[in-house]
Image: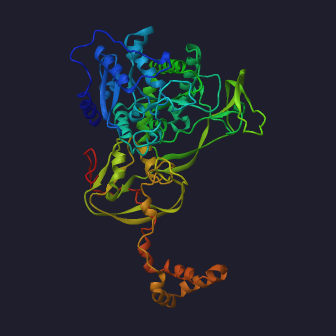
């Protein structure tokens, strides 16, 4: 119901003219080594929406620069209602462009591809029989409006590029989990409205040089539902590489991430662990086949654009040919995730397993060091090579948790609840004060990053102590049941040890700080009186002093030892207590009510 409502409101903002244009005139510039400016991009999509009844351009929320985030859709039967589309068994492909506006191939390619589909170039319109296409024209609008010929100076065109970061100086491809920007929140609205089967984010990369213009990051097949992962690994990925080899002059190769930073490509390359702060990792949490194209900066911009056009053609073509299987597997995964008990939260590559990959590279030359300046290695284009190299694709889980029946979040943390709700998480509130026996986490150890990432000193290597205890909760506190299609997202965000959890991003850092401070010297007399009356405690203390010479000589440590075993220590109950708790059994008389407003009242 909510999907339809939001999308209907958005459709009221549809950018259409009262009278259709007689023709479409899009002045592409990529052959001249130029990318379209933001206003030219929106004008192009407006023309397409005005001219073709199968197209719509709508506003779907705000961005940090104040401009609206647009969604362009192509639907063969002119049905733009996502729920209706899914009921017809059609697949939805969502394409995101310009997250880093200095990497603009996808911006221009998506317009060209859309126009080609709508005018039925090479019978492309046939894909619309079973595929609906959604395109975000430019995601980082603030970065796109700030153009310079000096951004990405090592890139072989276009002449002018946008700024990588957005209006808040944040990298938007690190914001999908925490969603601190208006851009990310609007993206979540689009993503959950469409509930796409396939997702693509378009990028450009530097680093190692080779003979390929376009490379591909695919989300880890290990992370997906078992049946989805098998289809992805065994059929979809090989099919896309085969299609690009057969139907594009550019071919395609997996993204080149070398096994050793200073190593040789011939030693092999590794699959990419796309954490949920990336667009593809985020999309995969919701059972979506997700990809990221990475064009090579050293290749000429017009070729990079054409290679993306080719990939868009092959990706939508594969989806068209396999739509029924793609939909079936996703629907099954969406059903199974509600019952899934065990979740994998962190992964480590398995270097004992690799696949053979035919690779076309260039010899890397390391010149002799000069006395005047440091020598710089380079890839010699006069010495191309073709060889089979190892491709390491298998990741194993290294952090596993069993989900609770529900998570309970005190209302003091309503900002966290709002983050969940923006991602289609169903939330309930307690209707009365209640005590529950729950599993609680105490943060034993945590390492803070030494420099900021997205304005955060991220928490790493978190150790916790699990304690089962009865905790008081109050009317209005939140209950998040784990029987939802968003279960992966819920668990990833609320488990403190998950590397991209809300705890990792510092939203719960106040709990790490000390609570009310009391000088132990201030109640030394009470502690000594308690020690005198407690023979067992005296025995424990003497044993500790006998075993630990430094403890024997440290009177403060001894007082602390006594204090931690005293009734007074009750004041420390909430010290480093993670406030999100795990309800393992639902009480029979649980009284709750659903939250139906867009955001909770206390935001």
Of residues 413 and 340, the one nearer the viewer is: 413
In the picture shown, does residue 302 fall above or below 391? Answer: above
Of residues 274 and 454, the one nearer the viewer is: 454
Question: Among all residues in the image, which is located at the extreme front?
Answer: 372
Look at the image and tell me in which quarter the N terminus lies. Answer: top left
Q: Position of residue 337 (x, y in %)?
A: 43, 40
Instruction: Please tell me how many numbered marks the rendered image carries.
Output: 0
Q: Is residue 571 visible?
A: yes
Q: Position of residue 589 (x, y in %)?
A: 29, 58
Of residues 481 and 456, the one nearer the viewer is: 456
Dividing the picture into quadrants, the one containing residue 508 is bottom left
Q: Is residue 362 left or right of residue 368?
A: left
Question: Among all residues in the image, which is located at the extreme left?
Answer: 18
Q: Position of residue 594 (x, y in %)?
A: 27, 48
Dividing the picture into quadrants, the one containing residue 146 is top left
Q: Position of residue 220 (x, y in %)?
A: 55, 36
In the picture shown, does residue 157 fall above or below 166? Answer: above
Q: Is residue 89 visible?
A: no
Dividing the picture into quadrants, the one containing residue 95 is top left
In the picture shown, does residue 600 fall above or below 239? Answer: below
Colouring rule applied to residues: rainbow
């Amino acid at each position: 119901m909510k999907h339809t409502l939001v999308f209907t409101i958005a459709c009221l903002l549809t950018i259409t003219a009262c009278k259709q244009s007689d023709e479409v005139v899009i002045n592409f510039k990529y052959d001249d080594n130029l990318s379209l400016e933001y206003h030219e991009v929106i004008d192009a999509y407006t023309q397409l929406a005005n001219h073709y009844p199968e197209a719509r351009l709508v506003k779907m929320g705000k961005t940090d620069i104040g401009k609206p985030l647009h969604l362009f859709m192509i639907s063969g039967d002119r049905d733009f209602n996502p729920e209706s589309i899914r009921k017809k068994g059609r697949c939805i492909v969502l394409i995101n462009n310009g997250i880093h506006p200095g990497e603009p191939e996808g911006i221009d390619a998506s317009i060209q591809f859309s126009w080609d589909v709508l005018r039925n170039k090479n019978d492309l319109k046939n894909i619309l029989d079973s595929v609906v296409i959604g395109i975000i024209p430019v995601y980082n609008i603030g970065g796109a409006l700030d153009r310079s010929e000096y951004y990405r100076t090592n890139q072989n065109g276009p002449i002018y590029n946008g700024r990588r970061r957005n209006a808040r100086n944040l990298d938007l491809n690190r914001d999908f989990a925490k969603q601190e920007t208006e851009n990310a929140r609007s993206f979540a609205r689009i993503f959950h409205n469409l509930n796409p089967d396939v997702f693509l984010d378009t990028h450009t990369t530097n680093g190692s040089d080779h003979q390929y213009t376009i490379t591909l990051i695919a989300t880890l097949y290990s992370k997906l539902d078992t049946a989805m992962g098998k289809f992805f690994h065994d059929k979809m990925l090989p099919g896309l590489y085969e299609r690009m080899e057969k139907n594009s002059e550019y071919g395609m190769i997996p993204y080149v991430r070398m096994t050793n930073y200073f190593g040789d490509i011939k030693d092999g390359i590794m699959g990419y662990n796309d954490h949920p702060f990336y667009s593809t990792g985020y999309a995969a949490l919701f059972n979506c086949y997700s990809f990221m194209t990475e064009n090579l900066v050293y290749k000429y911009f017009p070729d990079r654009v054409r290679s993306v056009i080719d990939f868009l053609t092959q990706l939508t073509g594969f989806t068209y040919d396999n739509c029924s299987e793609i939909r079936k597997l996703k629907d099954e995964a969406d059903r199974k995730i509600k019952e899934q008990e065990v979740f994998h939260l962190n992964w480590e590559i398995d270097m004992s397993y690799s696949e053979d990959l035919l690779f076309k590279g260039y010899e890397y030359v390391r010149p002799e060091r000069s006395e005047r300046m440091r020598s710089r290695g380079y890839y010699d284009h006069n010495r191309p090579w073709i060889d089979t190299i190892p491709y390491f694709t298998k990741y194993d889980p290294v952090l596993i948790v069993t989900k609770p029946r529900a998570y309970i979040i005190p209302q003091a943390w309503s900002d966290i609840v709002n983050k969940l709700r923006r991602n289609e998480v169903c939330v309930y509130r307690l209707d009365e004060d209640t005590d529950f026996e729950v599993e609680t986490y105490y943060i034993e150890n945590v390492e803070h990053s030494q420099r900021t990432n997205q304005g955060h000193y991220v928490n790493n290597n978190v150790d916790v102590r699990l304690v089962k205890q009865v905790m008081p909760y109050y009317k209005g506190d939140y209950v998040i049941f784990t029987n939802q299609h968003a279960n992966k997202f819920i668990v990833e965000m609320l488990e403190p040890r998950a590397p991209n959890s809300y705890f990792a991003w510092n939203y719960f850092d106040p709990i790490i700080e000390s609570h009310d401070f009391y000088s132990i010297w201030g109640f030394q007399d009470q502690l000594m009186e308690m020690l005198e009356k407690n023979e067992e405690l005296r025995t424990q203390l003497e044993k500790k002093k006998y075993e630990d010479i430094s403890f024997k000589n440290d009177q403060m440590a001894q007082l602390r030892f006594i204090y931690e075993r005293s009734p007074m220590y009750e004041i420390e109950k909430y010290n480093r207590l993670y406030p999100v708790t795990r309800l393992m059994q639902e009480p029979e008389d649980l009284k709750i009510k659903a939250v139906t407003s867009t955001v909770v009242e206390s935001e």
